[in-house]
Structures are given as C-alpha cells and as structure tokens.
Image (tube, grey):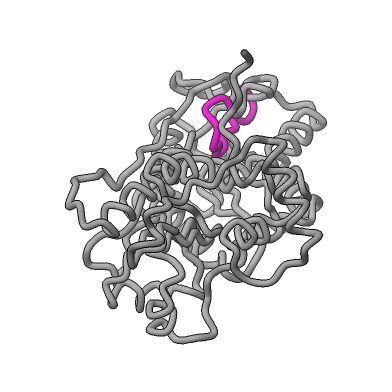
C-alpha cells in the first residue's frame, strides 16, 4: 500500500484555495463562514485524509487543547514563503504528536479587546508568534506579564525575563558571513535586505546595525562594507543597486541576499554583465531548506535556517509551559553554513 504523506491544514488550504485562517475557523467551529465554504473544506479533508488532532478529553477540562499560532506579518503578501511553510510544518507535526490543535491567523491576534478579556475567554491555551512585529509587541508583553503561556521567535526581547523565545540565529549568521568574508580576504562586501511592510523596519534596522558594527570593528570604509535596502516588489530597485556595486571603481566582491527568491535575479544580472560566480563576485543567501541553492549553477552557498525545527521546538516549549512539565528544552536552533560553488571556502588572493 502506498504510504501517505502527513496531511496538514496547509494542504487543505491549497486544495480549497482558502486562507489557513478560514480553514482553522471551520475546523474549530469558530467565527463566521458559509455553509458552502464549510462543505468545500470537509470534502477536501475527507479526500486528503486529514483528521484534526484535538483531544476529546479537552471537552471535560478547562483547557482547549488549542494553540494560537500568529504567522509572520509578511505572510499576508507572501503566503507561500519558505519560512512560513517550514515553520508551520514543524509546528503542525509537533502539535499532532502532543495532541493539540493549531488556530492559525496570518494577520495577527492583535485584539480589539483587552488582554485580560482574551485570557478570560480562553479560546486558546497559549500563543506562538512566528515572527515579532512592532504592532503587537505590546500585546506580547502583556501576555508574558500575565504569565499566559507565550512563545515567540527571535532574539530575547527586553520585556521577557524568562526567555520565552526560540532563536534561529538571525543576527548570528549575518555577522558570520561578514567575518568569514573578512577572513578570506574580501574587502568589498554588501548585505542586501528588503522590507514589505512597516512592521519589518525593526528587522531591517537590526541588519543595518550588524553591518555598521562590523565595519567599525574592522576599520572599514562605508564603500568596503555596505548595507543595501531595496524594494522587494520592484525588481528594478534590486537590479540598479547590484549593477551599481558591480560597475564602481572597486566593485563588490561578495554579496549576501536575505531573500532567497532574489537569487535568480542576482545570478541573471551577474552573468549578463559578463562576470563569473564566484571568481568575480561571491554570492551567499538565506535558505529555509537544506537543499535550497542546489538548483543554481554554480550551486549557491547558503545559511540554512532550520525553520522546521524552530516550529517544532516552539510548540514543545509552549506545551511545556501550558502543562507545567518543567522540562529542559533548548531554545536555540543553530543555523548551518552550507558551502557550495558560489562562495569558495579557500582564501581569496589578490587578482583572483
């Protein structure tokens, strides 16, 4: 008998062309939706063999056995981004194993009601924030202060004294890229980043500060160590920025791209200018798949962020808090620097 893959709520959303928030409402029988929409979802669940994992015993307890999962704020405009897919997959598997349901929202659980009302209504046993946006940090702070089970991704925030975070190394792998480039002899590097919503400006500022701190530490000029921000939805914005760096008197020697979809454009621009990777310019990018980058020629070197493991770990940590198990669970999920052809591990020499 052919083995079936583990069907998740994301598969139901794709099959019905509905948002994961709508699917979640129907599964949990909460909120408004039409009978026709409910019928579509139930039919897809039956055809794909999806069974919600809520514990029947939760009906007799004061727990809902439901976790509120707030997806990244950028997933509104990028519902299929790699981080969201991998994080959600890991969280779903962990929730199934621990017999919890996920109540998903790709906007945020920013409430119109007060935090105390949210807790009192007890729609969920705890929250996971897959990314931290400025607009709901105040909400998170109130939840944590009220000792309501809450987990978030990223560096530990100032108002969080107990370490309720899962950290995937966002700052570390960018610092490591700059340091590795420096040790290999690269003296003209650039870190490219983009933003899609105002909520991301905090993350952009963190990346900017990483570059600035490194530049000052090594005594480099602004031309030698650059931070480049571009408009993700305007391909010309990235093109003009990269072409300018490649045609200046001292052209850029190594670039880092934090948006994996931009890599194809970068390769095309570099090759169209008659330049070679990595001989003329080395390329490194963030990936959320272990094999992400192997499809390029030459194969792309990546900082592989273990987003699936982050999602799995976040659910483990939250359930540990909900059920007061007191287990020691590691909060850090180290990234992997995967060397491939686009960034030689050897030392760069003059004239190379």
Q: Position of residue 268 (x, y in %)?
A: 78, 32
Q: Position of residue 209 (x, y in %)?
A: 44, 60
Q: Quarter-wise, where is residue 346 in the image?
A: top left
Of the pair 126 and 196, the residue shown nearer to us = 126
Q: Is residue 61 above or below residue 236?
A: below
User: Is 303 situated left or right of 300 in this image?
Assistant: left
The residue at the point 43 percent across, 59 percent down is 128
Of the pair 149 and 3, the residue shown nearer to us = 3
Q: Position of residue 326 (x, y in %)?
A: 17, 52
**Would residue 126 be seen by someone viewing this image from the given angle?**
no
Q: Quadrant for the N terminus, please.
A: top right
Q: Quarter-wise, where is residue 266 in the image?
A: top right
Instruction: Please provide the residue range marked out in magenta.
Output: 278-291
The residue at the point 50 percent across, 86 percent down is 113
Of the pair 195 and 291, the residue shown nearer to us = 291
Give the mark count. Answer: 0
The residue at the point 59 percent across, 27 percent down is 5
**Would residue 76 be seen by someone viewing this image from the given angle?**
yes
Q: Is residue 133 magenta?
A: no
Q: Quarter-wise, where is residue 98 in the image?
A: top left
Q: Is residue 289 magenta?
A: yes
The residue at the point 42 percent across, 52 percent down is 56
Instruction: Identify the residue at the far top of this view.
Output: 1
Of the pair 1 and 241, the residue shown nearer to us = 1
User: Is 153 situated left or right of 162 in this image?
Assistant: right
Q: Quadrant for the C terminus, please.
A: top right
User: Is 341 situated left or right of 216 in this image?
Assistant: right
């Amino acid at each position: 008998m052919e083995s079936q893959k583990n069907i998740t709520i994301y598969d139901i959303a794709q099959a019905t062309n509905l948002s994961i928030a709508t699917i979640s409402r129907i599964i949990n029988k909460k909120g408004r939706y039409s009978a026709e929409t409910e019928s579509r979802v139930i039919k897809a669940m039956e055809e794909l063999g999806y069974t919600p994992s809520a514990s029947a015993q939760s009906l007799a307890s004061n727990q809902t056995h439901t976790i509120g999962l707030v997806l990244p704020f950028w997933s509104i405009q990028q519902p299929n981004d790699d981080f969201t897919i991998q994080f959600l997959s890991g969280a779903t598997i962990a929730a199934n194993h621990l017999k919890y349901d996920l109540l998903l929202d790709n906007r945020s659980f920013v409430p119109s009601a007060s935090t105390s009302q949210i807790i009192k209504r007890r729609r969920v046993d705890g929250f996971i924030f897959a990314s931290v946006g400025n607009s709901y940090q105040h909400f998170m702070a109130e939840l944590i202060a009220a000792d309501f089970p809450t987990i978030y991704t990223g560096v530990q925030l100032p108002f969080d004294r107990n370490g309720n975070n899962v950290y995937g190394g966002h700052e570390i792998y960018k610092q490591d890229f700059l340091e590795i480039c420096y040790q290999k002899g690269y003296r003209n590097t650039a870190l490219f980043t983009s933003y899609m919503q105002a909520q991301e400006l905090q993350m952009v500022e963190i990346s900017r500060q990483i570059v600035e701190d490194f530049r000052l530490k090594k005594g480099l000029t602004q031309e030698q160590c650059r931070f480049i921000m571009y408009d993700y939805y305007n391909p010309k914005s990235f093109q003009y920025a990269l072409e300018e760096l490649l045609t200046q008197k001292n052209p850029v020697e190594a670039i880092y791209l934090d948006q994996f979809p931009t890599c194809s454009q970068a390769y095309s621009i570099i090759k169209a200018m008659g330049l070679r990777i990595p001989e003329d310019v080395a390329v490194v990018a963030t990936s959320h798949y272990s094999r992400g980058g192997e499809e390029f020629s030459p194969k792309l070197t990546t900082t592989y962020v273990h987003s699936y493991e982050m999602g799995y770990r976040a659910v483990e940590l939250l359930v540990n808090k909900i059920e007061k198990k007191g287990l020691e669970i590691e909060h850090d999920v180290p990234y992997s620097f995967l060397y491939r052809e686009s960034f030689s591990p050897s030392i760069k020499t003059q004239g190379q």
